[in-house]
Amino acid sequence: MIALSRYNFFFYSALLIVALIIKDHLYVNEFIFCIILFNIFIDFLFKVLVQNFNSSLVIIKGIMSTLIRLSLSIIFILIAQYIGVDNLLNFTLNFLIVYLLFIIFEITILLLNLQHIK
């Protein structure tokens, strides 16, 4: 589990560093750090919840966490639209890029865990 924490820390750090580097570009929304922090919070929340339950049904837990993450992400985008974020299309595209990075990272970790079960 320590290796998983190191992977998470490296991924979170790398994502924040890249956001710091590209934050002044035209195609990056001003709320990029809110987007990243939301995804880090959701990722951390699901990792804590999965650790507290027994290790059976790992695949179903992974799929359910992905579906719940998608639902919470849609709610986050709707709240941003309600608040009135400037250039909502840019915000949504930035959110989807970060969301896909987190999903790819989650699937990679899930596959690594499945190799250990085998």
Image: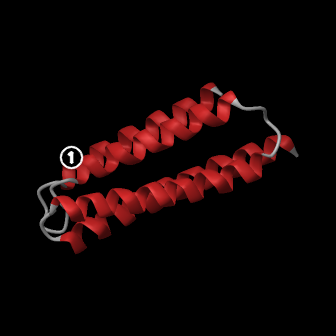
81 vs 90, nearest the viewer: 81
Residue 38: x %, y % from top left: 36, 46
Residue 80: x %, y % from top left: 24, 59
40 vs 75, nearest the viewer: 75
Q: Is residue 104 above or below residue 52?
A: below
Q: Is residue 112 above or below residue 90?
A: above
Q: Residue at x 41, y 63 (%)?
A: 74
**Callout 1, which amino acid?**
Leu
Label 1, residues with CA under 10 Å away: few <14, some 14-19, many ≥20:
few
Reading the image, the residue beneath label 1 is 20
**Circle 1: element type:** helix
Residue that protrudes farthest toward the bottom in the picture: 89
Which quadrant holds residue 54?
A: top right
Q: Is residue 44 above or below residue 59?
A: above
Residue that protrudes farthest toward the top in the picture: 2
Q: Quadrant of the N terminus?
A: top right
State left or right for residue 100 relative to residue 82.
right
Q: Residue at x 46, y 43 (%)?
A: 42
93 vs 26, nearest the viewer: 93
Residue 101: x %, y % from top left: 45, 57
Number of callouts: 1
Which quadrant holds residue 79?
A: bottom left
State left or right for residue 23 relative to residue 46.
left
Q: Is residue 114 above or below residue 82?
A: above
Residue that protrudes farthest toward the right in the picture: 118
Q: Residue at x 51, y 37 (%)?
A: 45
Residue 66: x %, y % from top left: 58, 56
Q: Residue at x 70, y 48 (%)?
A: 61
